[in-house]
C-alpha cells in the first residue's frame, strides 16, 4: 500500500498544478481586454 504521506504529497502537487492552470486559464481573457 502507498503510505498516507505519499498520497497527501501527490494530492498537494495535483492541487497546486490545477490551481496554477486555472489561474492562467482565467487570466488569459483578462489580457485581451
Image (cartoon, grey):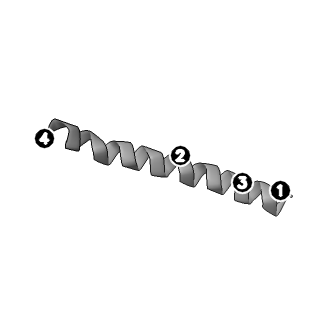
Residue 11 position, x and y percent, is: 64, 56
Q: Secondary structure at mark 3?
A: helix
Which-is-in-front pick, marks 4 and 3?
4
Residue occupied by mark 2: 17
Identify which residue is drawn at 27% across, 39% down: 28
Of the residues tagged 1 and 3, which is closer to the observer? 3
The residue labelled by disc 3 is 9
Q: CA distance from mark 1 to mark 4?
A: 47 Å
Depth order, front residue of 14/24? 24
Mark 2 or mark 4, which has the lower sequence index? Answer: 2
| Label 2 CA crowd tier, 10 Å (few <14, some 14–19, many 20+) | few
**Marks 2 and 1, Cα distance to the nearest angstrom?**
21 Å
Between the C-alphas of marks 2 and 4, the distance is 26 Å
User: Which numbered tag is attached to residue 23?
Assistant: none
Q: Residue at x 21, y 38 (%)?
A: 31
Residue at 71% of width from left, 54% of height from top? Answer: 9
Q: Earlier in the sequence, mark 2 or mark 3?
A: 3
* Quarter placement of the N terminus: bottom right
Q: Earlier in the sequence, mark 4 or mark 3?
A: 3
Residue linked to disc 4: 33
Which mark is on residue 2? 1
- Of circles 2 and 4, the one toward us is 4
Q: Is residue 32 above or below residue 15?
A: above
Amino acid at each position: 500500500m502507498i503510505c498516507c504521506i505519499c498520497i497527501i504529497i501527490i494530492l498537494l502537487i495535483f492541487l497546486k498544478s490545477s490551481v496554477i492552470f486555472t489561474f492562467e486559464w482565467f487570466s488569459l481573457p483578462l489580457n485581451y481586454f
